[in-house]
Image (cartoon, rainbow, N blue to C red):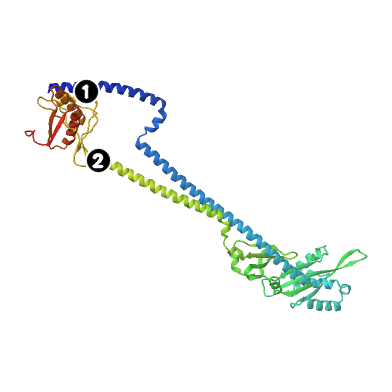
């Protein structure tokens, strides 16, 4: 037994020296590599937990960027839609102004046709010459009423009228007096500037359309135009409807408005009045009248065409795609985190399944950091593969070699490596004694199969014939 023990020690010593030289060479190479790639190696030596945290930070950062991009794209879609709608509104407004201008032109022509009757009278020199004659005034009134038709009523007002005369007249009043004073103070003799057109008493049942024409003649001696009187015609308000009679109902809604004491009053209207609730309205004043034409186009009921919203749709599509990608990436990341937690839990459970080493203080136990654990295998056996350093082996030989046998705790003092060294020593002893055959048996312990295999492999490697009789009792061996 002592011979085997001495040979094992010699083999360990020899192997330890060789290993020491190899380790020195490895250390030199390692230091050189560390010096050349220090920064790179530090990155590679990051702990798994830190690497996992960095990966999670990158993943969540990417998800955050996707969400921010989606918000930006949605904002771009909103801006593009608003821009397209504004562009469409501008187009509608331009079309509405064009339609209103055409309608205003037509209405102006209808009104001029009516006022041209006054010009016809004024061009007749006989009427001007005998304007102050009651007989001629009667003839003028009849002819002008006939031309104006519409149940028109014509009044002749002298140039030297007084305020009381107008105010006290049952068909006149302060409104007509104001118009007459404006004409009286006006120095222009232009046909358009010498006539006042206005709706009188618009909010009452006596509402009438007034035409007041200033009548002048050229005084050759004074070399200026002299006012000789005024012609006033009152027409029923129904005439106003003729100004917009050709307006098409499907085009929208139109109304003619006149201000009375600062408040607008609708004189006549035509079309779909529900369009007044729409935001787009264009207006234009009729020349030489106090009337304003307001127009609401029916085109604004039509939604903004898709052809103008393509850019907004592209932004919306990209934003939706970014949201979907962010959600998918988030789901994958959360699944990875869950899988990682399951793996960590599995590793913890497996570590708890390891057979704990002896913790009691005993003279047979040597404290060492290099201790091999017993790990349960799938077939119910025990793995004794472990990591043992040379200093540990030297200490083990003093503890496992007893007076009459070799014994120790498997996983602490006995493992496959130690059994191989014992086999090499036994083979060396047998060779010296010219023995070439040996029988090997084992008991029923879980560690026996692997230890027997290590022993047999080492003996066979050393040239010894081995008879393995399996698990038997000691007397049989």
**Quadrant in the rendering for residue 165:** bottom right
Estimate the x, y position of residue 471 in percent, counting from the top left. Answer: 12, 37
Residue at (33% x, 43% y) in the render: 340
Q: What element carries label 2?
A: helix
Q: Which of marks 1 and 2 is nearer the N terminus?
A: 1
Residue 57, picture quadrant: top left
Indicate the quadrant containing the N terminus: top left, top right, bottom left or bottom right.
Answer: top left
The C terminus lies in quadrant:
top left
Badge 2 is on which residue? 350
Residue displayed at 35% across by 44% down: 337
Image quarter of residue 272: bottom right
Q: Nearer the viewer, residue 440 or 172?
A: 440
Whether residue 370 is situated above or below residue 347 in the rendered picture: above
Q: Write down the residue under mark 1.
A: 12
Relative to the observer, which residue lies in front, 131 or 117?
117
Element carrying mark 1: helix
Q: Is residue 413 at all visible to an observer of this figure? A: no
The residue closer to the viewer here, 145 or 133, is 145
| Circle 1/circle 2 CB separation < 8 Å | no
Of 424 and 179, which appears nearest the observer?
A: 424
Which of the two discs, 1 and 2, sits closer to the camera? Answer: 1
Q: Position of residue 61 (x, y in %)?
A: 44, 42
- 433 displayed left or right of 220: left
Residue 78 drawn at (x, y percent): 54, 53
Q: How crowded is mark 2: few (under 14 residues within 10 Å), some or many (20 or more)?
A: few
Residue 449 visible in the current orientation:
yes
Height in image: 455 above or below 315?
Answer: above
- Please state the horizontal and vertical placement of residue 326, each as a whole percent of the image: 44, 48
Q: Which residue is drawn at 26% across and 20% down?
A: 17
């Amino acid at each position: 037994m002592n011979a085997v023990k001495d040979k094992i020690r010699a083999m360990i010593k020899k192997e330890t020296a060789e290993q020491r030289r190899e380790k020195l060479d490895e250390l030199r190479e390692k230091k050189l590599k560390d010096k050349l790639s220090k920064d790179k190696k530090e990155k590679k030596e990051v702990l798994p937990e830190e690497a996992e945290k960095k990966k999670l930070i990158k993943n969540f950062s990417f998800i955050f960027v996707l969400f921010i991009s989606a918000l930006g794209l949605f904002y771009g879609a909103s801006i593009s839609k608003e821009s397209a709608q504004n562009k469409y509104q501008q187009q509608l407004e331009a079309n509405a102004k064009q339609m209103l201008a055409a309608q205003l032109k037509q209405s102006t022509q209808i009104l001029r046709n009516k006022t041209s009757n006054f010009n016809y009278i004024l061009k007749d020199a006989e009427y001007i010459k005998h304007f102050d004659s009651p007989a001629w005034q009667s003839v003028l009134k009849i002819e002008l009423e006939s031309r104006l038709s519409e149940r028109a009523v014509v009044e002749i007002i002298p140039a030297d009228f007084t305020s009381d005369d107008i105010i006290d007249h049952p068909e006149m009043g302060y409104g007509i007096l104001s118009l007459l004073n404006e004409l009286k103070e006006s120095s222009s003799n232009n046909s358009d500037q010498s006539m006042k057109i206005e709706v009188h008493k618009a909010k009452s049942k006596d509402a009438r359309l007034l035409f007041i024409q200033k009548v002048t003649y050229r005084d050759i001696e004074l070399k200026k135009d002299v006012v000789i009187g005024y012609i006033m015609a009152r027409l029923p308000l129904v005439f106003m409807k003729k100004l917009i009679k050709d307006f098409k109902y499907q085009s929208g809604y139109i109304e003619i408005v006149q201000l009375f004491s600062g408040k607008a009053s609708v004189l006549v209207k035509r079309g779909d009045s529900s369009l007044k609730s729409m935001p787009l309205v264009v207006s234009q004043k009729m020349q030489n009248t106090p009337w304003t034409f307001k127009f609401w186009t029916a085109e604004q009921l039509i939604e903004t065409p898709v052809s103008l919203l393509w850019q907004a749709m592209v932004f919306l599509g990209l934003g939706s795609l970014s949201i979907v990608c962010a959600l998918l990436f988030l789901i994958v990341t959360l699944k990875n985190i869950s899988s990682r937690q399951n793996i960590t839990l599995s590793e913890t459970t497996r570590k708890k399944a390891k057979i704990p080493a002896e913790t009691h203080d005993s003279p047979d136990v040597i404290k060492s950091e290099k201790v091999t654990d017993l790990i349960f295998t799938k077939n119910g056996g025990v793995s004794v593969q472990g990591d043992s350093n040379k200093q540990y082996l030297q200490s083990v030989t003093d503890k496992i070699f007893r007076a009459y046998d070799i014994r120790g705790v498997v996983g602490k003092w006995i493992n496959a490596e130690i059994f191989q060294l014992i086999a090499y020593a036994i083979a060396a002893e047998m060779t010296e004694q010219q023995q070439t055959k040996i029988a090997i048996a084992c008991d029923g312990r879980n560690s026996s199969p692997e230890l027997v295999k290590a022993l047999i492999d080492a003996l066979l490697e050393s040239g010894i014939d081995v008879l393995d009789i399996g698990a038997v009792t000691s007397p049989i061996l």
